[in-house]
Image (tube, rainbow, N blue to C red):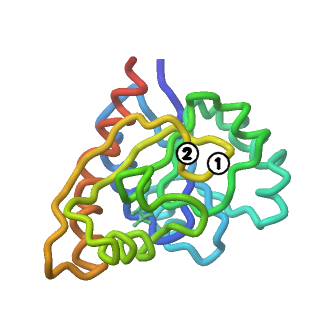
Amino acid sequence: MITNVAILASGNGSNAENIARYFMSIPTVKISLIMTNNQKAFVLQRARNLGIPCAYFSKEFWQDGTVVLNLLQSYNIGFVVLAGFLARIPDIILKAYPQRMINIHPSLLPLHGGKGMYGDRVHEDVLRCGDKESGITIHYTSEVYDAGQIIAQYRCEVKTDDTPDTLATRVHALEYEYYPKVIERLLSS
Ligand code: GRF
């Protein structure tokens, strides 16, 4: 049986593309849809290049959720992956995908998470706090930002001469390596 997966992303979409490419060689998983809340997001271009259907929804549509949910259901989406998605997920969609919607956060939650903690702000906060390690957290989504049940965490060193950029590069490498594998594991269990 094939699981149709949707990826939600708000910006660059390098994780979305990495995941899409990973599953091209796995016949039981199909990345069927990429959605964004940002009309200018580069992920839209990536989706077109990959030949994956993509859709943009304005803030009003996201907040209501009904049309978004209808689209997910019309593609028979069984699993939803958030990869750099910055809007709150409406309750109607959360309820439709219990334990079937996951997110990635570029720190070791509960450290450096919560509303407003995204992108470079996370890495700046890690450096400001003088943490010796950082990493990624993959977790189920919930009504509260970055607070859903943790599925997996992977760690990397924080170097004394790190900048937010150098740390982000190390954290991204963990994301590229592990996010597709965790998705594959969840879909096969
Ligand atoms: C990633 O670091 C992810 O952990 C965070 O947002 C970033 C998205 O990067 N939630 P990209 O758009 O996949 O390049």
Q: Position of residue 98 (x, y in %)?
A: 63, 28
In the image, residue 63 above or below residue 121 = above
Work out which residue is located at the far front of the displayed protein and give it. 129
Viewer-proximal residue among 137 and 68: 137
Q: Amino acid at mark 2?
A: Ala
Q: Secondary structure at mark 2?
A: loop
Count neighbours of disc 1 (C-alpha within 10 A) and say few if under 14, some if 14 to 19, many if 20 or more.
few
Answer whether labels 2 and 1 touch (C-beta < 8 Å): yes
Residue under numbered circle 1: 144
Which dot marks residue 73? Answer: none
Mark 1 vs ligand 1: CB below 8 Å: no
Q: Position of residue 184 (x, y in %)?
A: 35, 31
Which dot marks residue 147? Answer: 2
Looking at the rendered structure, the number of numbered marks drawn on it comes to 2
Q: Secondary structure at mark 1?
A: loop
In the image, residue 2 above or below residue 157 = above
How far apart are the two marked residues, 2 and 1, measured between alpha carbons? Answer: 6 Å
**In the figure, residue 15 lies in which quadrant?**
bottom left
Residue at image location 69% in from the left, 38% down from the top: 94
Residue at image location 36% in from the left, 58% down from the top: 107
Residue at image location 57% in from the left, 47% down from the top: 33
Viewer-proximal residue among 52 and 118: 118
Q: Amino acid at mark 1?
A: Val
Judged left or right of residue 52, residue 17 is: left
Q: Position of residue 162 (x, y in %)?
A: 19, 78
> Ligand 1 sits in which quadrant?
bottom left
Count neighbours of disc 2 (C-alpha within 10 A) and say few if under 14, some if 14 to 19, many if 20 or more.
some
In the image, residue 11 above or below residue 144 = below
Judged left or right of residue 3, residue 126 is: left
